[in-house]
């Protein structure tokens, strides 16, 4: 059974008509087609930014407490305490002073388009069967180009009929519209 299937499979390969023939053409020239293409790139820059931080308020708070205590001790009334708080807060804020400036590195990124020349195709001239042909290909084919040749079969059959015999004499065929004669 296996031999029968093998013989049948082999016979279909042997007796099947080939519809395509693989041929090779000789490349005469291959010229790259170059186009400018926009290529997006991310560009980042570093910048140093100096900021002045805010005061903590601790100096004014400590000054207000100390000033209020001193003002209350001296004046023994609400007015002396209020003046002491206010004066102590101002003095404490000045003593605290400004904090040192802070310097930070900040990265800023943006997308920019750069233009590059890129090969997008190749105009190839090749020779096959004594004639030259041109085609555009996505890559350089090298010294030869593989061709797939498909035979063209005419759908109109050509018949060779034998020549027709000569027509019999004119008297044997009555002219149209005439009555048959009896002999």
Image (cartoon, rainbow, N blue to C red):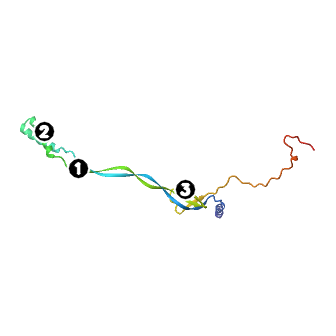
Q: Where is residue 58 in the image (x, y as percent from the top left)?
A: 17, 44
Q: On screen, 124 above or below 177?
A: below
Please state which of the two labelled residues, at mark 3 or mark 2, is closer to the viewer: 3
Asked if one can make out residue 79 in the rendered structure from this viewpoint, the answer is yes
29 vs 80, nearest the viewer: 29
Q: What element carries label 1?
A: strand
Q: Which of marks 3 and 2 is nearer the N terminus?
A: 2
Q: In this view, does 1 lie to the left or right of 50?
A: right
Which residue corresponds to mark 3? Answer: 135
Q: Position of residue 150 (x, y in %)?
A: 62, 57
Q: Is mark 2 on a helix, strand or loop?
A: helix
Q: Distance between the residues labelled 1 and 3?
A: 66 Å
Among the two numbered marks 2 and 1 on one chain, the one whose residue lies closer to the N terminus: 2
Residue under the image location 23 percent in, 49 percent down: 102
Seen in the image, is 67 located left or right of residue 104?
left
Rendering coords of residue 104 (x, y %): 26, 50
Q: Distance between the residues labelled 2 and 1?
A: 30 Å
Quadrant location, the N terminus:
bottom right
- Residue at 11% x, 40% y is 87
Q: Residue 86 carries which label?
A: 2
Tag 1 residue? 102
> Whole-percent x and y of residue 160?
75, 55
Contact, CB < 8 Å: mark 3 with mark 2? no
Tell me the residue at 24%/50% (across/down).
Answer: 103
The quadrant of the rendering that contains the C terminus is top right
Disc 1, disc 3: CB below 8 Å? no
Label 3 SS: strand
Q: Nearer the viewer, residue 177 or 16?
A: 177
């Amino acid at each position: 059974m296996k031999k029968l299937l093998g013989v049948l499979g082999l016979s279909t390969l042997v007796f099947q008509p080939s519809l395509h023939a693989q041929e090779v053409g000789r490349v005469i020239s291959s010229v790259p087609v170059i186009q400018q293409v926009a290529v997006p790139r991310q560009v980042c820059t570093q910048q140093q930014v100096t900021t002045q931080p805010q005061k903590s308020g601790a100096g004014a708070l400590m000054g207000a407490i100390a000033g209020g205590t001193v003002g209350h001790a001296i004046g023994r009334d609400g007015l002396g305490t209020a003046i002491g708080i206010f004066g102590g807060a101002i003095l404490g804020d000045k003593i605290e002073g400004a904090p040192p400036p802070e310097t930070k590195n900040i990265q800023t990124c943006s997308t920019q388009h750069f233009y590059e020349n890129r090969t997008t195709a190749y105009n190839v001239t090749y020779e096959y069967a004594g004639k030259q042909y041109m085609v555009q290909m996505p890559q350089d084919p090298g010294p030869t180009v593989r061709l797939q040749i498909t035979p063209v079969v005419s759908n109109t059959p050509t018949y060779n009929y034998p020549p027709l015999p000569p027509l019999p004499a004119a008297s044997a065929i009555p002219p149209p519209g005439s009555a048959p004669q009896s002999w």
